[in-house]
Amino acid sequence: MKFETLTVRRDGTVLSAEIAAPPMNLLGPELVRDLVALITQAEADDSINVVVFKSANPDYFISHVDIDRIKEYREEAIALAGEPSIALLFRRISTSRLVSIAQIEGRARGAGSEFVLACDMRFAASETAIFSQMEPAFGLVPGAGGIQHLARLMGRGRALEVLLSADDYGADVAERYGWINRALPAQELDAFVSALAQRIGNFPAMGHGTVKGRVNEIALAPVEDFRLDSDLFAEHIRRPEAQARLRAAVARGFQTTEAEIDLPLLLGRPVEP
């Protein structure tokens, strides 16, 4: 498998995909295209049971969507989701026969958070992993499943705190809130995830699909709810206030690696009328 933004390695029944979309792993059309191709090819290979997603960038797992290329990346999702929606693409990962594990170091904000939430399991480095659903800072609704997952994982109060604050949350708090399975020391993370992936990968794949299907019937929101959030995001981002806040954020360094190290500081500044 050869991709533009993914480096893929095979170890038995486990596929490891390292995200490398410099400078900050924005979710743009190239990364969406590669994710679609990876899932399609891996599902077609009955000898692959588990996919582990990592990042080549220690500061950014997936930073968020590329706001300059929204129409382009939505169009790339059609090949797997059937509609121009990364919400439905991510949900498709949740319902795949493949077991998906996110190994997170660095920042997973916005659609980056929603991508890891779509994975079956999430393990993060205690020292470096950061999570955020920052869309409400622009007057937007998280459009790729964040609301659906977080409300079910955290409960109403914590989900509202996370969503309405648009703030960064470290791995230890994310673990306590249910955002991730576990926070582990960075030096232990790779070995832990590798061992778990190999253990799961060696069990019968038929069992994986049946268990995932039964759990999804209980815990995964209906496809209509994901579609509605996707539509609301697309509608709200066209509003003048959202556009003004996005322009102000870009002027302050939004979508640059230096400014987004401390994104809550950038987003917390008032927007001049």
Image (spheres, rainbow, N blue to C red):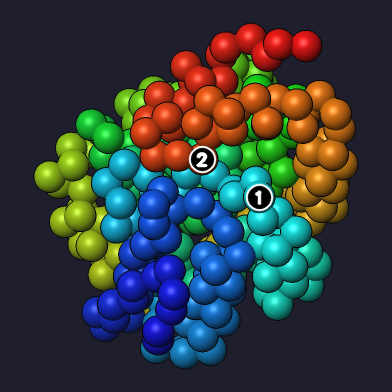
- Name the spot of residue 61 as percent of width and height, x first: 39, 48
Q: Amino acid at mark 1?
A: Asp
| Left or right: 16 in relation to 90 | left
Q: Give the image quarter of residue 10.
A: bottom left
Marks 2 and 1, the one that precedes in the sequence: 1
Q: Amino acid at mark 2?
A: Gln
Does residue 183 sit above or below 177 in this rendering?
A: below
Dividing the image into 4 quarters, which one contains the C terminus?
A: top right
Residue closest to the eye, 160 or 74: 74
Q: Give the image quarter of residue 100.
A: bottom left
Q: Is residue 123 visible?
A: no
Rendered residue at 18%/37% (across/down):
185
| Left or right: 272 in relation to 110 | right
Label pair 2/1, CB-CB below 8 angstroms:
yes
Residue placed farthest to the left in the image?
187
Question: Circle 1 is placed at which residue position?
Answer: 68
Question: Circle 2 is placed at which residue position?
Answer: 255
| Left or right: 160 in relation to 200 | right
Dividing the image into 4 quarters, which one contains the N terminus?
A: bottom left
Residue placed farthest to the front in the image?
251
